[in-house]
Image (cartoon, rainbow, N blue to C red):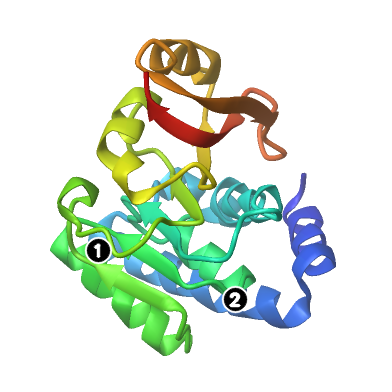
Amino acid sequence: MTQDDVHDWIVTHFGAARTEVLAQFTRRIVTETPNQNLIAASTIDTIWQRHVLDSAQLVPLAADAPDGDWIDIGSGAGFPGIVAAILTDRRVVLVEPRGRRATLLAEIAADLDLANVVVHQARIERLAVEHPAAIISARAVARLAALFAIGHRHGDDDTIWLLPKGRSAAEELAEAMVGWRGMFHVEHSITDPTSSIVVARGVRQA
């Protein structure tokens, strides 16, 4: 997909107003990247495809999620957490252990008037559980088994997990199913034919 194709896809699915907020967000990330190495320099010119669309495609996969928070583990530069906050009306909880990143995420949320964003500078395994999340996401954080281990207490049987993966999706899923049970399936990524998204529900220890 070209950058224009990506832009058109997002406008079609989410509307022009939200797409414009995404544009403001991407400009901020590009500006800040030299200071914090937020995204690889080689992906700046393709940020809409490599990062924005890669995050936005998760939102339709959560269409039947129950009411509740979207928790994003290891939010980094805000992919997919800030994107999800822009494209949905859910409360999105960004969990980022690095101080500078957490501060930047809070600043971006304030600058974009994203009142539905909460930022915690913490590791997910040390974050207090308020109530089960409706959705849990993590992009480029850890292997599936490790993600379930550190995050499962924040979910319940109805929580939908959205976990973008590259070529290792099938291998990681087989590895995770040794110690974890639930309903798992793999969606093909629309940004890269070699990448996949693991979608899980009812994750629990075996």
Q: Is residue 194 left or right of residue 118?
A: right
Along the line of sight, the residue nearer the viewer: 189 or 144: 144
Q: Is residue 39 left or right of residue 126?
A: right
Judged from the image, the secondary structure of the residue bearing numbered disc 1 is helix
Q: Earlier in the sequence, mark 2 or mark 1?
A: 2
Select label 2 or label 1 by which is in front.
2
Q: Position of residue 199 (x, y in %)?
A: 58, 35
In this view of the protein, can residue 56 be seen by the observer? yes
Residue 31 lies, with reference to residue 50, above or below; the image says below
Residues tagged 2 and 1 counted as in contact (Cβ below 8 A): no
Q: Position of residue 128 (x, y in %)?
A: 20, 59
Say which quadrant the N terminus sits in. Answer: top right
- Whole-angstrom CA distance, mark 2 to mark 1, is 23 Å
Name which residue type carries label 2. Asp
Q: Position of residue 13 (x, y in %)?
A: 80, 63
Say which quadrant the C terminus sits in. Answer: top left
Residue 95 lies, with reference to residue 17, above or below; the image says above
Along the line of sight, the residue nearer the viewer: 37 or 182: 182
Q: Which residue is mark 1?
A: 101
Q: Residue at x 30, y 44 (%)?
A: 153
Q: Is residue 51 left or right of residue 122?
A: right
Q: Residue at x 19, y 46 (%)?
A: 125
Along the line of sight, the residue nearer the viewer: 159 or 144: 159
Q: Is residue 62 left or right of residue 25?
A: right
Q: Residue at x 50, y 41 (%)?
A: 157
Q: Which residue is mark 2?
A: 89
The crowd level at tag 2 (other Cα within 10 Å; few <14, some 14-19, many 20+) is few
Residue 162 lies, with reference to residue 128, above or below; the image says above
In this view of the protein, can residue 105 be seen by the observer? no
Name which residue type carries label 1. Arg
